[in-house]
Image: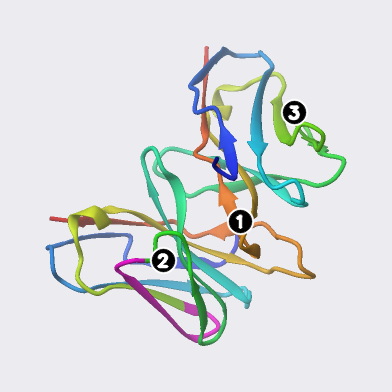
Amino acid sequence: RKEVEQDPGPFNVPEGATVAFNCTYSNSASQSFFWYRQDCRKEPKLLMSVYSSGNEDGRFTAQLNRASQYISLLIRDSKLSDSATYLCVGPHSGGYQKVTFGTGTKLQVIP
Amino acid sequence: DAGITQSPRHKVTETGTPVTLRCHQTENHRYMYWYRQDPGHGLRLIHYSYGVKDTDKGEVSDGYSVSRSKTEDFLLTLESATSSQTSVYFCAISDQDRGQSSPLHFGNGTRLTVT
């Protein structure tokens, strides 16, 4: 089983919709998680850090569910500019110096 | 944005030739990483460094070597390039602290094609 797994999508949603992505992880001792956004042919960019109680930043909310071992990213009022691939990131079994990336979930917001 | 510069941005090379990619940072971060990204595989760690002259292997290190002689520079070398090393290579930096993973910040990437 991969350390971090996410649905590759694509998720096609209309403008203004609310969309949620989940990411499951296997290391129950994991403490730190992150969501990254990657635009086509660009580098990944940090979107949000997800610590113990989750956090919110404008239209974006990240949650951590330790009991079921998954993290989620909720995007409200989707904009065309939200179209991108969203990468889930969790700790690596080899130590805190490394992290593990999910393969990404592609979001396409449609006019 | 974090001060990370990768060079070259694009490179085409022939099978069997040596190739060196450079990553330069101005953030004075201790940790530096080299990843490759391929369709269907996501980002995979090649090598990383936790200080000057201190490096370790990642999941896909075969065929690659690295060097870090200064805090700001991390070099990735393909000793004898193969077509399977055609990929997009990303350098990343991090300021890990107190045993907890910190977010990585990425450079713009290098597109390498091995013919």
Number of numbered discs present? 3
Q: Is residue B34 above or below residue B41?
A: below
**Front disc: 2 or 1:** 1
- Read off the residue under disc 3: A59
* B70 part of magenta stretch: yes
Q: Amino acid at mark 1?
A: Val
* Residue occupied by mark 1: A99
- Which labelled disc corresponds to residue B6? 2
How many residues crowd around disc 1 within 10 Å: few (fewer than 14), some, or many (20 or more)? Answer: many
Relative to the observer, which residue lies in front, B62 or B90? B62
The magenta span reads B62-73
Q: CA distance from mark 2 to mark 1?
A: 21 Å
Q: Secondary structure at mark 1?
A: strand
User: In front: A90, or A41?
Assistant: A90
First-in-chain label (1 vs 3): 3
Question: Which dot, 1 or 3, sits closer to the camera?
Answer: 1
Residue pictured at 70% horizontal, 31% vertical? A73
Between residue B104 and residue A3, name the one nearer to us.
A3
Q: Residue at x 66, y 57 (%)?
A: B103
Q: Image point 51% across, 66% down: which residue?
A: B33
